[in-house]
Image (cartoon, coloured by chain):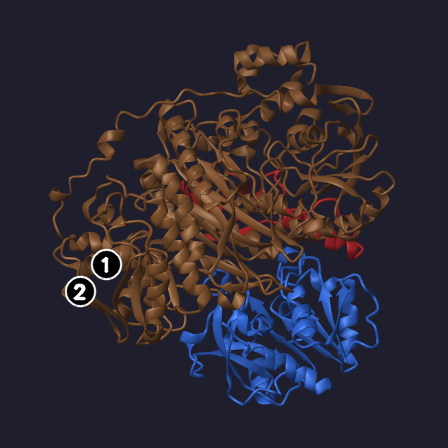
Amino acid sequence: MRFNVYVTLKRGVLDPQGKAVMDALHSLHFGEVRDVRVGKFIELNLDGLPEQEARARVEKMCQELLANPVIEEFRIEEVRA
Amino acid sequence: MKFGVVVFPGSNCDHDCHHVLKNVLSKDVTYIWHKTTAVDDDVDCLILPGGFSYGDYLRTGAIARFSPVMAEVEQFAKKGKYVMGICNGFQILCEAGLLPGVLMMNNSLKFICKNVHIRVENIHTPFTSKCRKGEVLKMPIAHKDGNYFVDESTLKRLEDNGQVLFRYSTPDGDVSSKANPNGSVANIAGVVNAEGNVMGMMPHPERVCEPILGGTDGLGIFTSIVEFLG
Amino acid sequence: MEDMETTPELIEEHGITEDEYQRIVELLGREPNLVELGIFSVMWSEHCSYKSSRLHLGKFPTEGERVIQGPGENAGVVDIGDGLCVVFKIESHNHPSFIEPYQGAATGVGGILRDIFTMGARPIALLDSLRFGSPDQKKTSYLLKGVVSGIADYGNCVGIPTVGGELYFHPSYNGNCLVNVMALGIAKKESIFRALAEGVGNPVIYVGSPTGRDGIHGATMASDVFGEGGEERRPTVQVGDPFTEKLLLEACLEAFGTGCVVGVQDMGAAGLTSSSSEMAARANSGIEIDVEKVPRREEGMTPYEVMLSESQERMLFVARKGGEERLLEIFRKWDLNAAIIGRVIEEQVMRIKEGDKVVAEIPVGALTEDAPRYRRPSRRPTWQDDLNRLDTDGIPLPQDYARVLERLLSSLNIASGEWIYTQYDHMVRTNTVVLPGGDAAVLRIKGTQKAVALTVDCNPRYCYLDPYRGGLIAVFEAARNLTVSGATPIGLTDCLNFGSPEREEVMWQFEKAIEGMRDACCRLGVPVVSGNVSFYNETGGVSVYPTPVVGMVGLIEDVERCMTPWFKKDGDMVALLGWHAEEFGGSEYLSVEHGLERGMPELDVDRELRVQEACRQCIMDGIINAAHDTSEGGLAVALAEMCFGPERTFGVRIGLRKRDIRADALLFGEAQSRILVSFSPENGEKVAEVAEKRGVNLDVLGTVGGERFVVDGLMDVEVERLRSLWKGGLEGFIEGGKVKDV
């Protein structure tokens, strides 16, 4: 079973990296870009758990390690083969 | 002879390079702003200094390579003039395709600032002519992304062409994995392009050019290019 | 929102007491609206107003021949000759770092750097003083790693070397780590800038990152005791952007050169509110700001949020009228947001407008000099007497002295800090002459023959056992660190980290520590030029040990004459400047070996001063090759550290013939006022002469050489073994997750 996890800074939290990338895009004549958020993409492959339990475990992994709940939020996506 | 030190937003070793050329070696040197679209004709050698251009956001050097001045740097190199990239400057030159390879995150995943030893591999370049073959230089590294990588065929080409300038070594000149601070392939610390006029290195020669700072092993690199342009 | 009624619940939520609220009503002559209440709450918070500490801080000596700017500005300024001055300050970022160690520490670095460059100085050095809880707490290594990478990523990116610091673990920090950062900059004497909003009609310019909702109520958070659920107060954490800081630094220094800047202040704690009102207060003027003109990152922000936001990397300038365009042009060149958001007015009020509508109007004095001052009650703790009793007869002599030394060298409060400082760029700007690991960092001043030496120091255990003497020792030990580097102390900055001032015992500790520091400063002739107080370092009723961190700066007239602690030559003599004493109260030895924290070392001020003078004289005369302060771990640890040179390891052999003193006290006791030196045999007489002239005991202990560490009759161990234990102690703990037992 595969899960994709997307970790980004919470809305409202300053994203210095996103801002620098946006400025660079503007200077490369992509003026239409209104906002850039840079985050992390994590692929997890799990074995031997029923779907619901697996998802709950991934959720827990995000809370404890993959994301920093102080400033980041995460989104979990299950990938079906 | 005139040197130009490129100032990107976030460059922080620009003053250090300028200081060595101006105050230690008494050479003519000027700062070149990253928004410049015309580098003066009288400049013979450009230095891309260390630092965190654009905060190193996205990837080291990834945004800096699109600075207006980089088109100039490319032209400058094409004309056969000389370009040195130190640390972040090396990373930018790689991103811009002026040097082969990429600099990945150190295998320790940490920023490392300490003195290391590098062995001079090729003394027949404008940047190393004042060094002795196999000479071991002591100088600091200060980076988080200095883990040099090229694929096997490129590595072979670099080795065959003598494009490897420096390798991390022990104080005795032994190139071993123990002496490799960041995981660089074949212990590579610095390279030169095939034409021999663009070089990049991770260690900081500008930090060891005065005895009061604990060493002068960086001087050889600067005096090489100075004498060459002589 | 500003029209909301100020209910008792709202007032309490803002951390304002009933009495304080009555005072606000009196000062305004009416009830405050919500924006005003928010402004009062941050400006009257402990963090901004120093309401519990101000009365006591007045005891410090703050003047001296070299002092150009004492406390009260963004940073202190001290003359170093050659038309130059040093600008320095230390500041805490304890509460934010405990909640989010990486960002908390990073923004701490950003804030202190801005305090330096707002004064017109270019920062050239950072130092950090870090304290964490017990190593066996799960959270300790998480906090340490986060704090270290936060400092590293921020300082490295801005390109200011982190050249020194200290690290200390103790269970009293389990619920509150301490992160204190000191910065030093250098400026021409005539180009120092101050935070003044002068000249009616002059425009007020905002520059830097746009304002978001970050850290709203950060200043009140820092003045609040953590409840058990403290970690939930999270949304107030700010994120730092070192790249913008670097641009801001360069842009500010360029702007100062134009002659168009009247005054400038960093928007630190309490952001726009504190910077604007404090600048007006210092200049006896008023200020008017239109929040609609403030650059913003988020939509729909209220005047309350804009005024209280603690978004990082922002500055407030007052420009000379007509010069604003020139400044804006420089900020544009550096790709920074900038806008004219208001002007200096004659009436001494802070007037906040949203377009044409006035949303807050407060007399400037009400926020600054009329803020409450408290003389909090203080009481000597009942347990204090017991703490100072130490029955030495009950403490057995060690079986194996070498093993004790090994254990001390690998213990976390003594082991090498290399794991930390190799993550900091400590060489950028090419001034660092003595790298981290010595007693003090030494930086040359380009264009002169001079150098400055810097140190941060505090032994919180001493301060707990006896706050007065602990404060005294903190200052003298910092001075000793500078002295052994060949420097003469010229100025001091302090960061006073304590528990809740509402506890009488804490207040007593605070008062006594200040008195000790004051007495030491007076005797040394070193002024206090800047500082910071951090109260409420307390969780679940447990306060941190009193931790008055001393940051001290010394001047070396000739950089070639600076000294390091490491042995230089086989065959050199080793000697102690100072007196042996049968003393191990408060020592690391007593804690590590016997699990006791009791007693307290003595300090004789006259002897201390004479020892330091003798050492400086020897360095100036060029007759010694190494000098090292004996501190935590005593003589044996200091001697071992002298063997661990950055280039090579030395052996040493000494004899201790003081039969009337217990061997463990001789080797591991922490008697004060002692410096170990080494010199070539032909200089022996000269060293003895200097010592005699100053009335200092000189005890020649032995000789440098060989590959072993030998104390005749007590221990004989391979130096390389000691070195690897000392080097690996901290790394083993962090990478392995546990403390190694030797």
User: In the image, what residue occupies the spot 76% across and 28% down?
Assistant: C289
- Residue for badge 1: C405
Return the residue nearer the eye: C548 or C661. Answer: C661
- Residue B154 appears in which quarter of the rendering? bottom right
Residue B12 appears left or right of C421 = right
Discs 2 and 1 carry the same chain letter:
yes
Residue C650 appears left or right of B1 = left
- Name the kind of residue labelled 2 in the image: Met
Q: Which mark is residue C177?
A: none
The x, y position of residue C386, in whole percent, is 22, 31
Chain C palette colour: brown
Please, is residue C209 above or below residue C233 in the view? below
Q: Look at the numbered discs 2 and 1 and tell me whether their residues touch, using CB distance below 8 Å.
A: yes
Residue C618 appears left or right of A38 = left
Return the residue nearer the eye: C353 or B152. Answer: C353
Mark found first going from the N terminus, 2 or 1: 1
Q: How many marks?
A: 2
Q: Residues within 10 Å of mark 2 (few under 14, many from 20)?
A: some
- Residue for badge 2: C715
- Note the chain letter of the red one: A
